[in-house]
Image: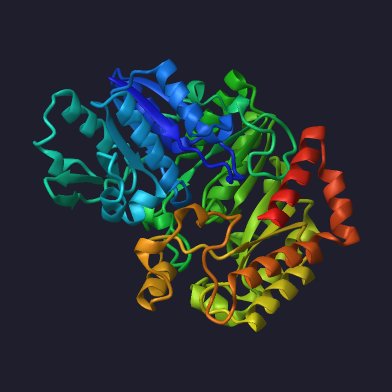
Amino acid sequence: MRILLAKPVNQKMKIIIPSMSLGYLASILKQQNHDVAYLDCIKEGFDQTDIKEWMQKNGPFDVVGCTVFSGDVYSANSMFKTAKKIWPDCHTTAGGPHPSAIPAHFLKNSPFLDTCFKGEAEIGLPMLLEAISRNDMNANLDNVPGLVWRNGEEIKSNEFGFIPELDDIPFPDWSLLCPESYPDSPHGTFTKRVPVAPIVSTRGCPFPCTYCAVSLVNGRKMRVRGIDNILDEIELLYNQFGIREIHFEDDNFTFSKKRTMEFCENLLKRKIDITWAVPNGVRLDTLDREALKLMEKSGCYSFAIGIESGSPKILKDMKRKVTLDVMEDRIRMIAENTNIRMTGYFIISYPTETLADINKTIDFSLKLPIHRADYHNFMPLPGTTSFNEILKNGEMKLESIDWDKIIILDTHYSPRGISQARTRFIVKTSFLKFYFRPRIILGLLKEINSWNQFKTVIKRAIQTFLY
């Protein structure tokens, strides 16, 4: 079968990286002799007209699948509609965070979507394709892990199907993803060397943070790849695609000091000449001087830290399980003992926040020896504890949500007593307070390695102040 795996149009998206989830699926489907194409509409800068032209030129396809974040809902549905108009008999399917969070609602409100998957699809999608190829969609769909499907007027939702051993699945199909063709600054920030490729070395998150949707896709149980498996993929990227920097997109890369040090030691033993970063964030409470020194020695030069709030009350409401004192102590330890660049992530307008709480967050961010700060408005991500509480309290209604606004650079929600305009103003002024300081400006100038990176800085600044 001919299968198109795509990332839908999202012209507000600041993170432009290869889709590893689609890359994993592509590898598995190719092993089963399917013909797979990959389209990243974000990287290509496509609009819906471009998609139609691309489909007409590169089709036909038997199956069209998209990975869908909440901010992609309308765009993905437009893509499915286009596919159905061009090839009426094609099967449309979707996966990713949004279908995983509210699968029945998503399928019900997507008239041109045939099925979707919640959680991981590496097991279920090949089984679905087998049913499609046999023209046997009415039989055995109850056995397809993670599948959400229509049975007449009823929408059925099967149990999740998580991969138990991550080393059992092949690497993403990097020849299809072409990582070397992606932007020099995939996360919209700095890189030390190019080209860059992302890697995920773990799946799952056991922590109960109320605003986070990670566990909805990958579950609560932590699953890890073997160190040799990770290093083999890095060597493949280095030798075959010229990759010179790795970004670990894990949500808990440093959850184990022992594993972190084992990775660094073996990376040094293999003498792979790369730099690496953790832009999605590290856990501070697992890091000490010994681990940090080894990370830096092996090529780590940057990571992000999910600080989120400077208010003890809000951290407790978020179920962060970490104190301000611990975070500040570890951040100062990192600054005093390494040259690793730190980016702090901060959430503004969490549901239980007051203006006093928000001011505590801003004040806390300004006193920390971090090098970059990313303030963003709270995003009510479907399926999270905070999202469900907002619905329960009547602050939002599921049917009236504007999904286009559920992205980092937009505002859809603000706490009672604080307008959305006010939260946007606070975010913008927070950036000004943080970045317009001599220490920060000089540090940023030192990080700029190319004209492209300079343009990226200017673009991000414009995005921040015009949204």
Nearest to the observer: residue 162 or residue 412 = 412
Question: Which percent across, then down, holds residue 351?
Answer: 51, 75
The residue that appears at 52% across and 30% down in the rendered structure is 233
Question: Which percent across, then down, holds residue 460?
Answer: 72, 48
Q: Quadrant of the C terminus?
A: bottom right
Nearest to the observer: residue 152 or residue 340 = 152
The residue that appears at 40% across and 39% down in the rendered structure is 78
Q: Quadrant of the N terminus?
A: top left
Nearest to the observer: residue 416 or residue 146 = 416
Judge whether residue 294 can be spotted in this image: no
In the rendered view, tell whether residue 265 sits above or below residue 104: above
Q: In the image, is 384 to the left or to the right of 151?
A: right
In the rendered view, tell whether residue 6 sits above or below residue 460: above
In the rendered view, tell whether residue 79 sits above or below residue 431: above
* Farthest residue, direction left: 139
Quarter location, residue 377: bottom right
In the rendered view, tell whether residue 46 sits above or below residue 209: above
Q: In the image, is 192 to the left or to the right of 212?
A: right
Quarter location, residue 189: top right
Nearest to the observer: residue 204 or residue 310 = 310
Judge whether residue 352 can be spotted in this image: yes
Question: Which percent across, then down, holds residue 186?
Answer: 64, 39
The residue that appears at 55% across and 24% down in the rendered structure is 178
Q: In the image, is 374 to the left or to the right of 227?
A: right
Quarter location, residue 451: top right
The residue that appears at 73% across and 69% down in the rendered structure is 365
Question: Which percent across, then down, holds residue 22?
Answer: 42, 34
